[in-house]
Each structure stands twice: as structure tokens, then as C-alpha cells.
Image (cartoon, rainbow, N blue to C red):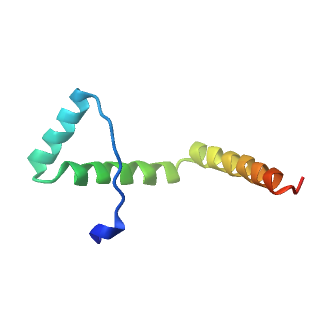
Amino acid sequence: MPKDATKNILLRLDPELAERLQTVASVEGRSVSDVAREAIAALVDQRRQDAQFSQLLEENLARHEKSLRRLRGDD
């Protein structure tokens, strides 16, 4: 991935979790950022396959669509 195609985020972790993350990265010879990206990508993929999450997504889309129509004056 080209460096200019990334986005920096600030992630706050409790010290114990941060230490565990650092340990995983160290043992695997990887950066903390790389391990965190992998974990986040896995979570997103998991959610995309989760029926309950899909239902929540549909509900949110419908609600936002209604709000946008109201803002536009379509109601």
C-alpha cells in the first residue's frame, strides 16, 4: 500500500492491552501498526458476514436516508 494512501488515526489502549499488542508484534517481528491493521481488517470482515450487524447497517441506512430527505425538503 503506498504511504500516501494511508490515514493516520489515534488509538487509545489501556496499558495492559497495549503491552500485549507490543508483545505480539515483537514476537512476530512486525510493527504494532501492522498487527493492529490486520486485527482491524479481520474485525471488519467478521462484521460484514454477521447477519445482526447487517440488520443494524440497513436500519442505519434507512434512518440516514430519511434524515437527508428531510434536510433536502423532500418530505
**67 sits to left or right of 27:** right
Residue 5 located left or right of residue 61: left
Task: Residue 16: name its quadrant.
Answer: top left
Q: Is residue 72 above or below residue 18?
A: below
Residue drawn at (67%, 46%) of the image: 60
> How far across and how far down the image is residue 59, in percent?
70, 46
- Measuring 51% from the left and 53% from the top, which residue is drawn there? 48
In the rendered structure, the answer to whether residue 75 lies left or right of residue 25 reads right
In this view, the residue in front, 60 or 53, is 60
41 left or right of 51 in image: left
Residue 10 in the image: x percent, y percent?
A: 34, 44
Toward the right, the furthest residue is: 75
Q: Position of residue 38 (x, y in %)?
A: 30, 53
Residue that appears at 65% across and 46% down:
55
The one nearer the camera, 4 or 31, is 4
Horizontal and vertical percent position of residue 5: 35, 68
Q: Is 62 drawn above or below residue 3 in the view shown?
A: above
Q: Which quadrant of the rendered structure holds the N terminus? A: bottom left
Residue at position x 16%, y 47% in the image? 25
Q: Nearer the viewer, residue 45 or 16?
A: 16
Number of numbered discs overlaid on the protein picture: 0
